[in-house]
Image: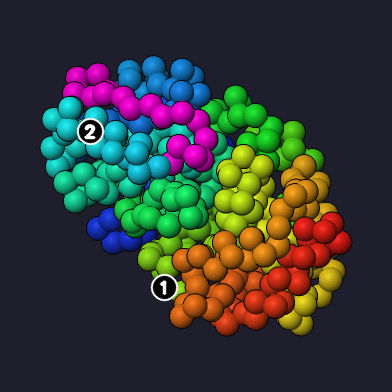
Amino acid sequence: MTDQPNGQTIDVALGQRSYPVWIGRGLLDNHARWRSALRGRHALVISNRTVAPLYLERIARGLEGLHWSQFLIEDGEAHKSFHNVGLALEALAALGATRDACVIALGGGVVGDLAGFTAACWMRGIDFIQIPTTLLSMVDSSVGGKTGVNLPAGKNLVGAFHQPRAVVADIGTLDSLPDRQYRCGLAEIIKGAAIGDAELFAWLEQHAPALNAREETALTAAIAAKVRYKAGVVARDETEQGERALLNLGHTFGHALETAGHYTALLHGEGVAVGMLLAGRLSERLGMSGAADTQRMQRLLQAVGLPTAVPAGFDAEQLLALMRLDKKNIAGTLRLILWRGIGRAEIVAGVNEADVLAVLNEATRGLG
C-alpha cells in the first residue's frame, strides 16, 4: 500500500445500484456534488444532538429550495431502537414524503443504521445518503447497505440490506472527534487488514504513530484502503452469503461484549478490538494459527490505544449465551470468523462451544 492524495472517489459496483464514496476535506460544503444524489423534493435529515449543532447548518444550506425537516436522537448505541424508527417514520409522514424522497444520515454508525432502516421501511424503500462523521462509520457502516436496530436480546438483530445513493466522507468532521471514538475507527481499519491484506497490516504497524497523530496524508490513505477493500467485498457478496461474512472478524465476540456491557462498557470499535484478539486466541487453540500472529495483533491494537482485555466483571457463560444469538450461526451451532494468521481469515462452522468457553474463561479471569 502507498499513501494516496487527499480527495478521491471509490465506487461500490452494484450494477444499477452502484454508488460513489467520496473521501476528502470540505465535502459538506460541496453542495453541488452531494445534492446531485437527491432525486425528489423531500428530504429528512436524521442526526443526533451531539453532531447536529456542529454540521447540520452546513447541510441545510445545501437543501435550500427543497421541502426538508430534521429528526434528532440522543447520542449512543442504546438509541438505535424501534421506538426511534417509529418516530422517524412519523417525521417522514409529517413532511409528506413521497417515494422519491431522501433520508440523509448525518452522524456515526448508530445514526446511519437507523436512518438507513427508516429509509428501507418508508413506502417499502426510498433513497438515503450517508454522511458519516466518525472514522468508524466512514470505513465501515456507511459502506455496504447494512441497516438495522437493536433489541434487548442483542445488537442488530433486526435490519435490512438497503444501499445508499452516495457516501460523503468529509474528513474535516474528524477534527472534532474525541480520541476514544477516533481509535474505534482505527480498530475497523486494522480489522480489514487482519482479514485479507497482510501488506496493509504491515503498513499500519509502520504508520501507527502518524495515525495516532491524525496526520492527514496517512489517515486519508488508511480510510481509502479500507473503503476500497470493503467496496470490493460488497460488490462480490452484497447480502453476505459467503465472503462478506469475513468482515465480521471479532464481531461475534465483540457484539456479545457490547450487549453484556449494556452498550456503555465498550464502544463498538473497542468491542471489535477485544473480539479480534479473542478470535485470534481461539484460532490458536484450534491449531489454525500461531501465537506470533496474535501477539502482533495485540501490539498493533495497543500501539493505537485500543483495549485488548475483557473489562472486569464480565461472565464467560453469559457471553457465550449472547454469542449463540449471532446471525452467522447455522442450525444452532456457532459459526465464527477465525484466521490462519494475518491476512488469512476464514469462516469456520460448527465451532465447539467448549473451546469458545475456555477462551472466554481465560479472558474474563484476566489470564489471556
* 367 sits to left or right of 150: right
The residue tagged with tag 1: helix, strand or loop?
Answer: loop
Image position, residue 46 (x, y; %): 35, 31
Q: Residue at x 57, y 82 (%)?
A: 350
Give the residue at x 61% y 51%: 260
Q: Which residues are magenta?
A: 63-80
Q: Position of residue 355 (x, y in %)?
A: 72, 77
Q: Nearer the viewer, residue 1 or 192?
A: 192
Structural crowding at the residue carrying mark 1, measured as other residues with C-alpha within 10 Å and reported as few (<14), some (14–19) or many (≥20): few
Q: Viewer-nearest of labels 1 and 2? A: 2
- Figure quadrant of residue 21: top left
User: Circle 2 — which element?
Assistant: helix
Amino acid carrying mark 2 in the image: Glu
Can residue 90 be seen from the camera position used here? yes
Residue underneath mark 1: 241
**Residue type indicated by callout 1:** Gln
- Mark 1 vs mark 2: which is more N-terminal? 2
Looking at the rendering, in which quadrant would you find the C terminus? bottom right
Residue found 50% across the figure and 55% down from its top: 154
Residue at image coords 81%, 46%: 303
The x and y percentages for residue 198 are 70, 65
Whether 330 is drawn above or below 219: the answer is below
Disc 2: which residue: 90
**Real-space Cα distance between discs 1 and 2?**
34 Å
Quadrant location of the N terminus in the rendered image: bottom right
- In the image, 225: left or right of 64? right
In magenta stretch: residue 86: no
Residue 27 x, y percent position in the rendering: 44, 30
Q: Report the front residue among 120 and 138.
A: 120
